[in-house]
Amino acid sequence: MKRKRVNWSRDPEAVGEFVAMAKADGFRLSSIVSGRRVLMRYSEFLSKKFRSDLYAAGWSQFLAYKAQLAETGVSKATVRCYLTYIGSYYRLLAQATQLESVSTLCWRIRTVGLPRRTWSERHRPFDSAILKRILRTARRKGGEDYVFLLTLLYTGGRAQFYGLKVREVNFRRMEISTVVKPGKRVTIPMHPSLAEVLQNHLSQRAYHSIYVFRSGGDPSTRKGMQSNRQNAWRICKRIEDKGRIREPVYPHRFRKTLATVGRRAGMDPQFVQAILGHETVMATLDHYAQVDLEDVKREFAKLDLLGGGNPANSSRRVRLLQELAPLIPKDREQEWSGHVEALLAIAGIPAETRAAEFSKSGRAALLRAIKGAAVPITGTRGFGKAEVTAGGVVLEEVDSRTMQSKLVPGLYFAGEILDLDGPIGGYNFQAAFSTGVLAGRSV
């Protein structure tokens, strides 16, 4: 049976622009096809009901379409999927045109226009007992399953990492750089535990391949992407059945687990964002940093709603500056208070803010203020506090292989007597050690 060919050249102008912008933005082909289909239906709806088009549509038209979708009886997840594609179109249009009206519409769609996810639709992280059971089952089974599941866990649950190439794993720099979908390459840090497992796997495997895993495919092609995704899911389901695990095991739950464990451990959200490859920190916090109900119970129990006599709770009502007092360096109280109050002012946070009222947005604003603060250098603390001296014997007058003077035979130099200095961080110690060894061996 022949598949019917679709002529995209007859699409409305706005839909054609979406396809072009989505390709440039790195959308995978399946997303472009689905988004085009949704926009065609939305365009038809606008034409029939409002005699309008995608360019002229606004918030009221969007709400009308949202209501019509709900009336058809489709699931909330399907409605959310349709409206997300519409929101993606206006996001791309806002980036291309910089029009305030389009940016406002995009913001309203993304913040209040999408139906909230139900709990059953969310990707829940594994609890520690289930995760250990999954990995224990994979290890007992043998083969590549254990190695791949650890790769999922430490790289943020990317099914496309089944198509990871050997040359894309840099053990010297402890980095992984690969394509996760056409047009999108990511570079993420490699955890030492994963590096050890991958090195053992590559040295012991009984076959030769450019890919880390036996059946890996090129993720830059549609066929390779599909093959990698299928193989990743097969491994997850194989371990789920083998270990008789009574909850679904699939790649994205490893991604959620990494983000949630990172949040609980106090990892900087920007670090988690870098590993997961999100565009913004808010995407990481909103969708992947799962809040555990037990954590909520513990923190909620500390809240003194009546302002009563629980000393443990009342201590949390102190001003933010008072809570930071134990961190003040000795004999630097005045300078510390001045710096902190200035940073709070830059971040738009009142100095009298109480610690318990320090919101997430306030913390984010303070973080931006700290990272963006310019600190002018006004002087030094003198030679007595110096870490390294500059100047000395000119390097061109010394043989770098032996540290012997080129002008006076039998005279050797090492350490800070040379015109050699580097930044703080052990560089000057290393220079002293290395030149000393060279000179000692050459005498």
Image (spheres, rainbow, N blue to C red):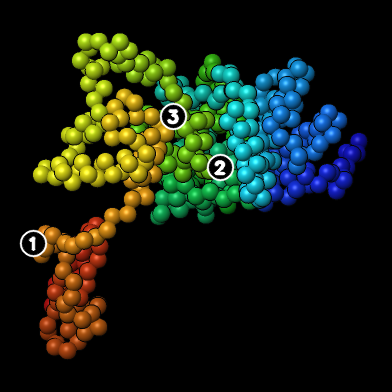
Question: Of the residues shown, which amino acid type is indicated by label 2?
Answer: Phe
Say left or right for 408 vs 302: left
Q: Quadrant for residue 195, please give it.
A: top left
Q: Secondary structure at mark 3?
A: helix
Upstream in the sequence, badge 2 or badge 3?
2
**Residue at the image point whose x is 67% and y is 20% from the top:** 76
Mark 1–mark 2 CB contact (< 8 Å): no
Q: How many marks?
A: 3
Measured in 3D between alpha carbons, the distance from the residue under mark 2 to the one under mark 3, in whole angstroms, is 20 Å
| 363 up-or-down from 391: above or below | above
Q: Residue furthest right?
A: 1
Q: Which residue is mark 1?
A: 384
**Residue at the image point whose x is 25% and y is 62% from the top:** 423
Upstream in the sequence, badge 1 or badge 3?
3
Front of the two marks 1 and 2? 1
Q: Is residue 337 visible?
A: yes
**Residue at the image point whose x is 22% and y is 12% from the top:** 310
Upstream in the sequence, badge 1 or badge 2?
2
Question: Of the residues shown, which amino acid type is indicated by label 3?
Answer: Thr
**Residue sitting nearer the eye, 28 or 228:** 28
Quadrant location of the C terminus in the rendered image:
bottom left
Say left or right for 213 vs 408: right
Q: Secondary structure at mark 1?
A: helix
Rendered location of residue 376, percent (x, y): 27, 58
Q: Secondary structure at mark 2?
A: helix
Crowd tier of the residue under label 2, counting other residues whose Cα lies within 10 Å: few below 14, some 14–19, many 20 or above: many
